[in-house]
Structure formats: structure tokens, C-alpha cells
Amino acid sequence: MTLTRTLCIALLFLLATLQGCLAQTESENIKTKGIAATMTVVTKGAWGGSADVKVTLRAGSGFGGTNIELSSGDTLSVRANGRSYRLSKHTDLFSVYYLAKVPEVYHNTEFVVSFNREEDTSAPSSTTALPEPFNITSEQNQTYNYKDKIPIHWEPSQPRSTMQLSYTLTCRQGSSSSLIVFTRGIPDSGSYNLNLHSHFADEDPFDSCRGEATLNRRLAGTLDPNFGAGGSIMGIQERTLKFKLDMSDG
């Protein structure tokens, strides 16, 4: 079976080489009015669990935007439940970003993210909350034939809203592995049948495939208007269903 959407080792190598080409600058070189901010507050657990606050700053927009690293004197922090948490620097293949973990959060917890500057205008009041929590009620780690639809159930639903569904398949054939990553919007109806058959052709079967389907319920917040290049802040409830695929034709 041939994957229609595959991230090959060659592609990953190409992306790795691009890392050195991605532009990066210090925040002292960019006015706040020229900065775009992307902020997320994500919780993956039960009521009263922790949330990860992530902030990425860019000059410009899109894939070609310049990554911004904080200079001395510029800081990012988040305030929730009467306490303040400093965001620390992290990097990945594509960007520089800043993270903080906030313990004991609820869907009505307010998060205020502050970008404080020593020399230029600060942006101290980007705010959001978490949407209503939900639980995936489908059984974890079940095995389905690759031709069958995978039932995903969750509760409670919000029928007038949409969710983001992302799924990842890791398939092996001998010592080789392939990866599918796909994202789509679906109704927040409490039930969805995931059809994966279209990702495969009917020859050269893989030995095995494992999958994860992740649901995100999102709530848009209000970004501080001093970020002149725009952006967003979003509260997200995230839950994941793990499963296996039987690759036989029987």
C-alpha cells in the first residue's frame, strides 16, 4: 500500500537544512508595531490540570517571517490564578518560541500574557480563557482494519461549533517507516467517523501502522493591539485517541 501523504526522510533532511536559512533577529531590532504574535494556552488533562502557554514572535508573516529572540530587557510572562510565570526560550526545526507551564487551571481561568519591553512600547494585555473541557469516550489502543472507519466519540459536544482534528499515522514495512500528518475542521457534534482508507493504495502492504487522532476545541481571545503586525491568542482543550491499524485485506 502506498501512502498518499508521506513525510520521507529526504524531506526531513531538506527541512533540517532550511533551519539555518530561516531568518532570526533580536527583539531590540524590531519595534512592537512591527511584531506579529502567535499565542496558545493548551491543556490536555483533567479539570484542574496544568496548561502550556506558548508564544512565538515574528517580524513579517508566513513561513518567510523573521523569528524574534528576546533581547536582554524584554520579557514574556503570563498571569493566571493570581500568580505570574516567566516564559523561557525553546527552539525547534522552524522557530524560536517561549513556554511556561501554569498549574491548576480551569475553563474559566483567565490568562493574561504580557510582552514587557525596556526600550519600546510594551504589549501587556493579551487575554484568553480555556473553552469548555471534554473527554474522548472511545476506547484507547483499539485495533481497526485500515479499510474501516474509526469511530471517535467525545462529550460534551458543542453542536454549533467546530473542532480541529489532526491525525498522525506511523507505518512500518521491514526496517522502513513512513509518516502521514493531516489536519481538518469537523463539527463539534460528539461523534466523527475517521476514514483512513484513502491514504492507501491496494498493493505492497505495510506490516503495521499506529495512529493518533487529536481533537482541539478552541476559544479565541483578544490580542494586545500594540502588536502592530497582528497575530492571535487562543485557549485550547486538547485530547488524543490512540489506535492501531490491521493492514490485512481480510
Image (spheres, helix red, strand yellow):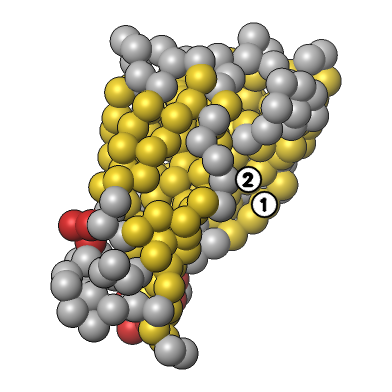
Marks 2 and 1 in Cβ contact (< 8 Å): yes
Tag 2's secondary structure? strand
Q: Which residue is mark 2?
A: 98
Q: Is residue 173 left or right of residue 196?
A: right
**Rendered residue at 57%/27% (across/down):** 135
Up-down relation of residue 163 to residue 200 (above or below): above
Pick the front one: 15 or 24: 15
Q: Which mark is residue 89?
A: 1
- Residue count near mark 2 (Cα–Cα under 10 Å), binned few <14, some 14–19, many ≥20: many
* Marks 2 and 1, how far apart at CA: 5 Å
Quadrant position of residue 139: top right
Pick the front one: 10 or 118: 10
Picture coordinates of residue 164, whole percent (x, y): 37, 34
Amino acid at the residue labelled 1: Lys
Query: Which sits earlier in the primary sequence, circle 2 or circle 1?
Result: 1
Up-down relation of residue 80 to residue 186 (above or below): above
Q: Is residue 93 visible?
A: yes
**Rendered residue at 67%/52% (across/down):** 89
Quarter containing the N terminus: bottom left
Tag 1's secondary structure? strand
- Spot the residue most to the right: 83
Picture coordinates of residue 204, whole percent (x, y): 23, 83
